[in-house]
Amino acid sequence: MSRESTREADNVRFFVPRKDIRRLSSLPWSAPLEEWHRHGVRILSIKSGLSRHVVRFVAAGRERYAIKETTPLSAVRESDCYADLRRKGIPTLEPVGVVSRHDGRGLVQTAVGGQTEKRETGYLITRLMDKVIPDSFLFRRGFSADNRKRIWDAIIDLFVQLHTNGAYWGDASLANMLIHFSAEVVPELGRRTRLRAVLADAETVETRPSISASMRQADLDFFLESMLWTEADLKASGIVRDPLITLDDQRYLVEHYHERYAVELETRSFELVTHIDVDRLLGSFDAKGRGALLLQHINEHKWYVSERFGRDIGLVEAAEDWYRSVFRPVCRIFSDYGLLEFFPDKTAANLYVEIMEHKYYMSQKESRDVGLVAALEDYMTRFAPEESLGDIVGIIVRALRSFVDLHHTPRNVLIA
């Protein structure tokens, strides 16, 4: 972290981007953080959870910051940890930097007598996030059965992202995360709003090339135990009466964590051999086996294009051709004719794979290749949660048949 500015007069040093220096340097760093309201600082009334450190939310110019009082070493370590995790795509607070203040020298008693040592205070600066809910307010809004699954799914995703990137949390709890209403672009679908759990305390995070199964389980166990502590505290405060986490919730969290961890490993393997960025181009896989099935389709497409071009096509080149000439056009038909509106919880990739699986089982049952068009028509008729979609089925089927015919692609080779 490079130092952008220094104020030697009051022993305050700034390790923040130049664009934030002017705003942050106007704050009363010589005073304890908990007294800033007495110095004309605009303290924001922000919903926040419990913290063992003094934390204040302030407005400085047009920017809004969260400032945590700690030690310089701890502040630097946590800021760097946030930056490293964000580079890996893990949702965390956005670090701005660190401010340190030299507080003179103090007397410390040791085994050989009194010694003086330098005293310093550190401040971790992060940028405030919009549309987030901390744990204490999450429960006040109603941690009901209807909301549990979405919240657990968001928390599971955060654990999986940390663990598959070699990050051991060590202090996993709802108090150390935020629930964020995130607008995200889903490939072939456009923007959707989803809940994401955001890491909001990285003091104890350790990053390694990989972490063991026992360390991953330790993070889960600590989180489940922390939920019981949180429940006891909130019940004692009169905030909640019902259990925050039931036995069914615990089973759901553990079982789905292990499933999604396996899905993420499969996703990375698929990306490694195909060079296709799943989240950006296909949409995340929702079950184990999705990546393996798509890889099978790409290998069969590789055979087809190799025959067509009269030479052996490599897997990466075949994957690029499959994505460009098969996956995107088929999914665009799904999107243009509103098919995905009948399946709002699915990504284009998952709907595509499910139709291909449906085609496989239909073909097995009839002892012949039924073709993609017939499989799509039967899948929609069986599983779309609408009664009046007969006309739409016909329109989509005709559009898909026209695409197949236009490209002179054998129906049984397009996607086997």
Image: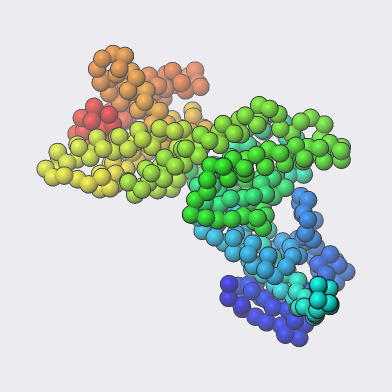
Quadrant of the rendered image containing residue 330: top left
Q: Residue at x 68, y 82 (%)?
A: 6
x and y, in percent, of residue 20 in the image: 65, 72
Relative to residue 347, is residue 23 depicted above or below? below
Asked if residue 195 can be seen in this view, the reply is no
Q: Residue at x 32, y 46 (%)?
A: 273
Q: Residue at x 65, y 31 (%)?
A: 250
The front one of 49 and 141 is 49
Quadrant of the rendered image containing residue 307: top left
- Image quadrant occupied by the N terminus: bottom right
Quadrant of the rendered image containing residue 292: top left
x and y, in percent, of residue 142 in the image: 75, 35
* Residue located farthest toward the top when viewing the structure as drawn: 366
Relative to residue 50, is residue 42 depicted above or below? below
x and y, in percent, of residue 354 in the image: 40, 28
x and y, in percent, of residue 373 in the image: 31, 25
Left or right: 380, with 66 as reference point:
left
Relative to residue 390, is residue 167 depicted above or below? below
* Residue located farthest toward the left when viewing the structure as drawn: 310
Q: How many marks?
A: 0
Left or right: 213, with 357 as reference point:
right
Asked if residue 1 can be seen in this view, the reply is yes
The front one of 72 and 191 is 72
Left or right: 398, with 387 as reference point:
left
